[in-house]
Amino acid sequence: MSQRNPGILGGNPFKLGIFGSNCSGGLSFTTLPERWDPSWDNNVKLARLADEVGIECLVPIARWKGFGGATDVNGTSFETITWACGLLAQTRRISVFGTVHVTMIHPVLAAKQMVTADHVGHGRFGLNIVCGFNSDEFQMFGVPKYEHDVRYEQGQEWWDVVKKVWSCAGPVDHKDKFYQLSALEASPGPYGGKNPVMMNAGVSLAGRNFAIRNSDLHFDDLHFSKSGQPESASDRIKETKRLAREQAREIQVWMPVSVVCRPSRKEVDDYLQRCVDHADWEALENLMRLFAGPSNAQAAAIEALRKKIAAERKVLGYGANWAIFGEPDHVARELCRLHEAGFDGVAIDFINYLDELPYFVQEVVPRLERLGIRKPAC
């Protein structure tokens, strides 16, 4: 039997993933003509390239509605479990995640779908659990949007149901707060008898605690560090890993990162300015409103964030993720800096994945190998 989720469980000291290629625009809010087109053929080309060069995983965004604006960012998207299943059939080593809204996909159905994908990939499927934030999507599905912490309570129960289904120990009942289910049973279980790796990106107290209890990978960010810099995240990362070990669990800590890499700093700066000049501000402001919710101070907060995004030129990464902009030496040093702070890996987004990943692999990855945090792909 091949290894369960190769590369992620073991492998390189610092791991690399690709984030968001199943959605139009990826994580960038720009009207640039070269922005990402998430056609199926483009996704297959990207998956095969990432597989060939030793990237550890592909992580999709669970998106049901776009953010409007001139380009309706993320308005075109592939459902993530079936997307993963198709890409697992087209690759050999890379892990492919499905990102699943627990409120919108019934756990029994999801468990069966994910096991199917896992067998297609011979143990390379991974699950990213999300509890949702977009009120428009909840309304489209006609499901209640509970208070923030209650959504994580539902997430825990959803995950408990999935694991019961995967155990193949049925028939077993599940009667709790959110799900009243009778005589659960299923076969087959996950490939090789071991559950797929699971990640969660909750960074609130409830979300982080959920990840520590359940996840193999936790997506954290730097907003909770003292200075907003990688070095000040070290204590939080150590605490996350310590708390997981106290529950007899090992957990990796990852972070999403937006990358623009060009041969010279001038080329980077010129391109970033072009991104801002062609920003889809309407879509960005729609996203900000969803995050901010109803508030008397909403307009001021949106304007302040608009100025911050323009100043920092972050029209990638939903305008909030950590961004690395520079020539190859700078990008490699900054990734090494994240590794030294304690991060186990990053999930990267580009303006155009197929245009930019080859240069990243050609110029940045060998520098990471020389720095000793990655090994050459076999």
Image (spheres, rainbow, N blue to C red):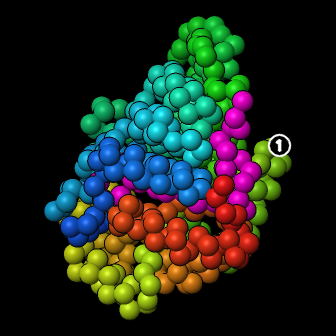
| Quadrant in which the C terminus appears | bottom right
Depth order, front residue of 120/76: 120
- Image coordinates for residue 290, horizontal then vertical, percent: 32, 56
Residue visible at 51% across and 54% down?
A: 50
- Looking at the image, which residue is at 59% across and 77% down? 332
Magenta span includes 227: no
Residue flagged by tag 1: what amino acid is it? Ala
Name the dominant secondary structure of the magenta segment. loop
Quadrant in the picture for residue 142: top left
308, 72: nearer the viewer: 72
- Is residue 63 positioned above or below 341 on the image? above
| Residue position for label 1 | 248
- Quadrant, the N terminus: top right
Q: Is residue 55 left or right of residue 20?
A: right
Q: Position of residue 343 (x, y in %)?
A: 67, 65
Secondary element at tag 1: loop
Q: Quadrant of residue 11?
A: bottom right
State the extent of the magenta-drawn residues as a range. Answer: 1-27
Q: Is residue 167 above or below residue 292?
A: above
One can see residue 36 in this view: yes
Q: How many marks?
A: 1
Residue at the (29%, 47%) spot, across then down: 39
